Image (cartoon, rainbow, N blue to C red):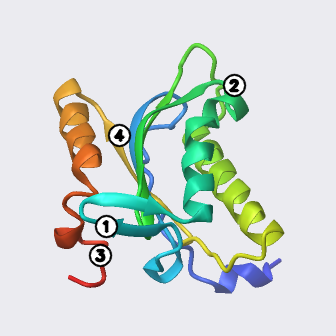
Amino acid sequence: MSDEYDTYPRRKSPRADFHDYSCGDYFVTICTHDKRHYFGEVDNGEMRLSAIGEFVDAELAGLSSHYPYSDVLMWVVMPNHLHAIIHIDDETTPHVRSALSVVVGGLKRSVTMYARRNNIEFGWQSRYHDHIIRKPEYGNKIAEYIRNNPFLWSKDCFNDEV
């Protein structure tokens, strides 16, 4: 018996198939739809958040209250994307495969609901990018990148004005 959905090609998952994403440290990048500047603008190397950008920032700060097994160690909200280092704790994770996806999906859902409640035009890119942080020196380089992101906006690959 053939399923009507079998005719559609399956997209390859961008997640590493050798890792279950139930614990560890991850560098996550989430972009807005069409890389539109919903979250604010960079002015002289400083991010000026819009209302929805402020909401995203607050949600990142409080993410662990919704997902106690997660901790956002560092983040930056940029005009059309965000970067975060998210730790998924092995001791408290409900050991669901892809706990990271649950956390990211919850963040995206919460921001989308805020936008709808406040009649703010908004949309996410359908996927997100993650990088498993395996060594402290990689985490340190990523933290430096996040810290300097607003200052380097004029050269950023996500800046559509470059």
Q: Which numbered disc, 4 or 1, marks the residue that appears first in the sequence?
A: 1
Q: Position of residue 101 (x, y in %)?
A: 59, 47
Circle 1 — which element? strand
The quadrant in which residue 103 appears is top right
- Give the residue pinned by disc 2: 94
Q: Position of residue 130 (x, y in %)?
A: 40, 50
Classify 10 Å Cα crowding around label 3: few (below 14), some (14-19), many (20 and above): some
Mark 1 → mark 2, Cα distance in angstroms: 41 Å
Circle 2 — which element? loop
Quarter containing the C terminus: bottom left
- Give the residue pinned by disc 1: 43
Circle 4 — which element? strand
Mark 4 → mark 3, Cα distance in angstroms: 24 Å
Kind of residue sitting beneath label 2: Pro
Asked whether, in this view, residue 117 is left or right of residue 132, the answer is: right
Q: Which numbered disc, 3 or 1, marks the residue that appears first in the sequence?
A: 1
Kind of residue sitting beneath label 1: Asp
- Give the residue pinned by disc 4: 132
Q: Which numbered disc, 2 or 3, marks the residue that appears first in the sequence?
A: 2
Q: Which numbered disc, 4 or 3, marks the residue that appears first in the sequence?
A: 4
Asked whether, in this view, residue 19 is left or right of residue 134, the answer is: right
Kind of residue sitting beneath label 3: Asn
- Give the residue pinned by disc 3: 159
Q: Which numbered disc, 1 or 2, marks the residue that appears first in the sequence?
A: 1
Asked whether, in this view, residue 106 is left or right of residue 161, the answer is: right
Q: Nearer the viewer, mark 4 or mark 3?
A: 3
Q: Nearer the viewer, mark 1 or mark 2?
A: 1
> Would you place residue 8 above or below residue 107 in this image?
below
Kind of residue sitting beneath label 4: Ile
Tell me if label 4 and label 3 are in contact, CB under 8 Å: no
Q: Residue at x 55, y 60 (%)?
A: 53
Mark 2 → mark 3, Cα distance in angstroms: 37 Å
